[in-house]
Amino acid sequence: MMPSGHIQIAAVMGHPIAHSRSPFLHKFWLKEYGLNGSFVALDVTPENLQKELRALPSKAFRGTCVTIPHKETTAQIVDELDESAHAIGAVNLVTVLPDGRLRGQNTDGYGFIENIRGHGTWEQSRKHAIVFGAGGAARAVVYALAQEKFEAITILNRTRAKTEALTASIQPAVKAKLQVADWAARNDVLKDADVLVNTTSLGMDGHPPLEISIEQLPSSALVTDIVYTPLATPLLKAAMDRGNPTQDGLGMLMHQARPAFKAFYGQDPDVTPALRQALVDDIQKTHT
């Protein structure tokens, strides 16, 4: 903890950065807990990323959140990685250590699991999870599900090569059996799933729909989409219509920010209905 009266400064880096909800989240919590802190958004181009990260200690920053497109590159710049960031190959949280070195973490998987915890029956049956996508978010989700001791995880992406690369890089770090399936088989691999996760942009506002039939999915399977615009994606609506438990992606956004806020300001914040409603209102205001 910083001495009383000292402003604790943190940031989020990305390019572009205007879309990021991190400033809203951290400022909400700073006000909620009455902390003397500041949180700023920094538009950092890829060619300036290393310079800006290395400048954090001299500028008295406690650290920074990292968003698109810098997560993978940041993992190559920082001085040390935690276990999850090393396995996933991406960083979304950088903290400045007392000696000025930079430590990279990945809290996306933590945020994902905390968001779905208590939803559906997957905590009793962890035999098979299905993950759509092979980007950075998919990597975090696959690793997190494996850490939750799922026996098998099937990964599908429109580009099979990306799926195979994801599997090859994460499999050595986990005990779960990682399986690759063709995108064309997405309707047919669902019959024994405990969890179905969409990490792609398909179904998000301004993007093409996720074309899928979930008729073979068990009615007990949890269906979750990590996007939050809209909150109820077509996939989630289809799951709700047939009685599956569902969970939108807004909770993941909130929960992944908790470790960052604690690292920056020394307070473990709560994810509350008031925070969720404030975020929903802010998102709706932005999209009108």
Image (cartoon, rainbow, N blue to C red):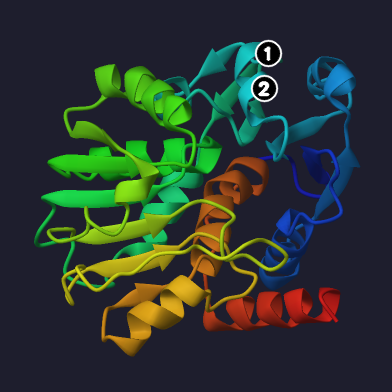
The total number of labels drawn is: 2
Decide if residue 95 is on the left or right side of residue 83: right
Q: Quadrant of the rendered structure where residue 118 is?
A: bottom left
Q: Pointer 2: residues within 10 angstroms few (<14), some, or many (20+)?
A: many
Q: Quadrant of the C terminus?
A: bottom right
- CA gap between label 1 and label 2 equals 5 Å
Query: Label 2 amino acid?
Result: Thr
Query: Which residue is under mark 1?
Result: 77
Q: Nearer the viewer, residue 279 or 99?
A: 279
- 166 relative to 220, above or below: above
Q: Which mark is residue 167?
A: none
Q: Nearer the viewer, residue 95 or 203?
A: 203
Q: Which mark is residue 74?
A: 2
Q: Position of residue 207 (x, y in %)?
A: 67, 61
Residue at (60% x, 47% y) in the render: 266
Query: Label 1 amino acid?
Result: Ile
Q: Quadrant of the rendered structure where residue 178 is?
A: top left
Q: Pointer 1: residues within 10 angstroms few (<14), some, or many (20+)?
A: some
Q: Nearer the viewer, residue 242 or 226?
A: 242
Q: Quadrant of the rendered structure where residue 114 is?
A: bottom left
Q: Secondary structure at mark 2?
A: helix
Q: Position of residue 101 (x, y in %)?
A: 66, 14
Q: Quadrant of the N terminus?
A: top right
Q: Nearer the viewer, residue 270 or 169?
A: 169
**Disc 1 and disc 2 in contact, CB within 8 angstroms:** yes
